[in-house]
Image (cartoon, helix red, strand yellow):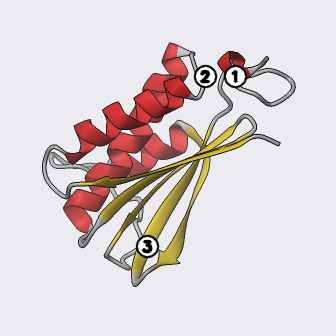
Amino acid sequence: MSELTAHLDVPLDRGAPGSARRAATAVLTGWGFRDEDWLDAAAVVVSELVTNAVRHGGGCLELQLEAHDATVVVSVADGSAVVPRRRDPDGIGGRGIALIEALSAGWSVQNYQGGKRVRVELLACPGAGSDGEPAGRRP
């Protein structure tokens, strides 16, 4: 079983979603995930998680990427214990959870160091081999 993990501390500011999106895409590409549509969907999930943490969280912001064979989990931890919830969209927001649900296999929330960690399992990446390895990582 192949396991890869990346931990990134993200500055808690307005530029955080873009920085996190670029970093996550670079890591996933480096791990061998090559499907552009899948990478775009992963970037949207990262951006939504980080945007929610910047708007509604607090404290330190940590992005974690995990690849266990072909399963990829993205998680963002922040200092707020308030659990995200789906709400009606308005002119300011309210679409993040719906986007995450549309682009993932599922999500959950865990208590984490006095705050929370939101974990999202991404949909399977096309091109990942039957052996579970991303296409670019097979021998």
Name the residue that disc number 3 marks.
Answer: 116
> What percent of the width, then of the height, locates residue 85?
41, 65
> How far is disc 1 from disc 2 in space, using C-alphas?
5 Å
User: Up-down: is 83 above or below 92?
Assistant: below
Q: Earlier in the sequence, mark 1 or mark 3?
A: 3
Residue count near mark 2 (Cα–Cα under 10 Å), binned few <14, some 14–19, many ≥20: some
User: In what quadrant of the picture does the N terminus appear?
Assistant: top right
**Hey, which quadrant is residue 15 in on the image?**
top left
User: Up-down: is 20 above or below 128?
Assistant: below
> How far is disc 2 from disc 3 in space, using C-alphas?
29 Å
Q: Residue at x 16, y 49 (%)?
A: 92
Q: Residue at x 57, y 16 (%)?
A: 34
> What percent of the width, then of the height, locates residue 106?
62, 50
Dots 1, 2 in contact, CB < 8 A: yes
Residue type beneath disc 3: Lys
Name the residue that disc number 2 marks.
Answer: 32
Residue type beneath disc 2: Gly
Report the disc number at residue 137. 1
